[in-house]
Image (tube, coloured by chain):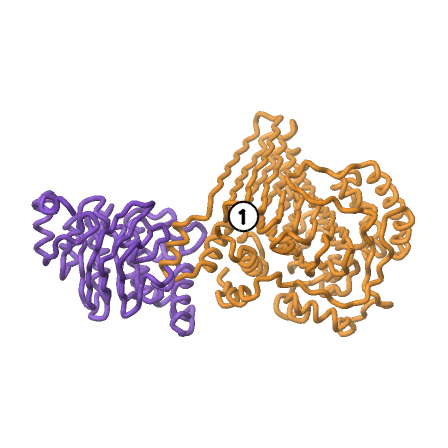
Amino acid sequence: MITIKNLHASIDGKEILRGLNLTVNTGEVHAIMGPNGAGKSTLASVLAGRDAYEITAGEVIFEGTDLLSLSTEDRAREGLFLAFQYPVEIPGVSNVNFLRTAINEIRAYKGEESLSAKDFMSLVREKSALVELDSKLASRSVNEGFSGGEKKRNEIFQMAMLAPKLAILDETDSGLDIDALRIVANGVNQLKSPENAAIVITHYQRLLDYIVPDFVHVLYKGQIVKTGGKELALELEEKGYDWIKDAHPTV
Amino acid sequence: MANYTEENLAEELENQEYKFGFVTPIDSDTIPIGLSEDVIRLISNKKEEPLWLLEHRLHAYNVWKTMEEPNWAHVKYKKPDFQNIAYYSAPKQSKKYESWDDVDPEMKATMAKLGISMEEQQRLTGVAVDFVMDSVSVATSFKEKLGELGIIFCSFSEAVQNHPDLVRKYMGTVVPTSDNFYAALNNAVFTDGSFCYIPKGVRCPMELSTYFRINAGGTGQFERTLVVADEGSYVSYLEGCTAPQRDENQLHAAVVELIALDNAEIKYSTVQNWYPGDKNGLGGIFNFVTKRGICHTNSKISWTQVETGSAVTWKYPSCILKGDHSIGEFYSVAVTNNYQQADTGTKMIHLGKNTKSTIISKGISAGKSQNSYRGLVQIHKSAKNARNFSQCDSLLMSSECGAHTFPYIECKNSTAKIEHEATTSKIGEDQLFYCKQRGIGEEKAIGLIVNGYCKEVLNQLPMEFAVEAQKLLTISLEGSVG
């Protein structure tokens, strides 16, 4: 699905990712954990194509394509989705209009016809049920006046609508109470299939109680310093990150 | 807004150069350039006007001669040479059209290019169109149907001929001849425009629509619009403008007067996309317009404008809230790009008790343009319990453009309640990134964000105008983020 090799990225001249390597295959869920400032969100932003970051070395192959040569929108159209840590508000633009535009842009890119209004609305109904999103929210302006939990659920709703190949969830659990966490995780699990994959970036182990990862990676100082199974997350929860830091003083 | 289709938009975007930049090769009957009493007499004579109107013109001319061109607006331009303008231009046709079939095919083709084919308009929308090509009305539709209700909707010249008493009674009562330099000039040389009268208690069953088009090169166009809504009546009036591409500046100085008598309501909507000049700031229309309405007791006037065109805009649709409980509204989107300059806003003059006004202004500046909101809220001593709410937002699309706000508030009654909110923001990188991450390309993303930003104003427009306006906004801002 995606292979990241020796990825170096910096912002404002400061290097954040320092030779990151990661391979995710279809059907897999990878969790990326790590202390504050390790570069977790930078990884998400770089993969999605945020302008502010400069890639200084390395390559990313996504479904056989050189991901870094694609524009932000083309990466999305190729099937890469980022659930934002801080979803953005777009006043005056309804969620429905926003998503319909997105879906039809993606379809046009693939040479497919636009979705009819009827088919689109039935898709909205089906997918909004998945994350228990109030159908009223679908017609409200994108994220405007949404609670923290609603914003995160809306991200997963959008993910469900766009059906990406690779979903990157950037701290989707932050700011969620336990009920919202369950709903969001439930949505993610239902969308899981042998054809897609997910990278779940998180600070805490608790999300991984609901979304069970195949691999857990520890990101520290811009590199993946440790990889393990689900039990690694529990170990981190118990011991914190200091033992990782101590083991990699010079990274 | 549900009719807004992305496909149409994409098509429009293919053609981002000024869409209506063509000239219709129709012989124009243009009088020699320059302005004098003789020229005014000639205009009046050509139009077979009554003596009182000629005297009105000559008086205005003499007033105008004593006035100076205003320079307080936040705009810079080369002052027009008023002796180098042709003040009258009419399509050279000896007879008036009896029916739509008689209309010059050239002209029909022009209207088709404008996307306002009369057949279609008549068939699909039920909108009556009074099409002003240069200075003379060439076609008026639905007149009979309106006539049954006693509604008069015709060219200003026809009104002068057929309804002289109404014209004489109301003309100049809202915008006096000496109001300002351009209004005075308009009074002296106006050639045509539209007239509308809605009788007592009548609710006009359709949107009345006028499309203006400046056609002959070097011809200033001086329209005159007068809308009178008699007691208890209602009318929604649409005005849309396009003009052909030109390298020389064209002066446009219209006067629009609205009169809402007791319990009447007038909704006046404008979509203005006149040629704004090319991307180097060459050419474009000078739009110096005086628009004002007066509200009598318990009446309401609502101005909605979407301004994307013109090289220089100087325009303040205003309301005089004379009657108790009267309401004035102003909803505006003003877009400037490249070297466009706009100084626009409104005046809400509160005279009556319990009068209310609302101002929603959305400015969008791109390129190297300058966009100013200038507004006056004036509460007179007599205006007990007057209310005003103003919201002026500016959106910056580039780092070289300017957004300015000049709000004036004068309050002479302590029971008044005035609220003013203003924001300035740069189009959000985060918003753009968010859209792009969902697969939406940059231009479409800008279109979405900007249309969302303007939604409160666009929602005030009748449906067919709202769709056109959304497309216009996107086209106007093509390639403008920087």
Query: How many numbered markers are drawn?
Result: 1
Q: What residue is shown with label 1? A: B364
Residue located 22% across and 54% down the image = A19
Q: Nearer the viewer, residue B420 or A173?
A: A173
- Position above or below: A4 against B257: below
Q: Colour of chain B?
A: orange
User: How far from the left and from the top, in percent, is residue B448?
Assistant: 46, 56
- Position above or below: B292 against A104: above
- Left or right, residue A234 beside residue B166: left
Residue A134 seen in this snapshot: yes
User: How far from the left and from the top, in percent, is residue A168?
Assistant: 26, 58
- Left or right, residue A69 beside residue A188: right
Amino acid residing under circle 1: Ile
Q: Nearer the viewer, residue B51 or A170?
A: A170
- Position above or below: A196 against B361: below
- Position above or below: B326 against A156: above
Asked which secondary structure carries label 1, the reply is: strand
Q: Nearer the viewer, residue B207 or A1?
A: A1
- Left or right, residue B223 beside residue A113: right
Q: Which chain is purple?
A: A
User: How far from the left and from the top, in percent, is residue B302?
Assistant: 62, 47
User: How far from the left and from the top, in percent, is residue B412?
Assistant: 62, 26
Residue A171 seen in this snapshot: no
Residue located 63% across and 67% down the image = B115
Q: What crowding class fits label 1: few (fewer than 14 Cα within 10 Å), some (14-19), or many (20 or more)?
A: many
Residue located 58% across and 25% down the image = B414
Q: Nearer the viewer, residue B327 or B358?
A: B358
Q: Mark 1 falls within which chain?
A: B
Residue located 44% across and 54% down the image = A93
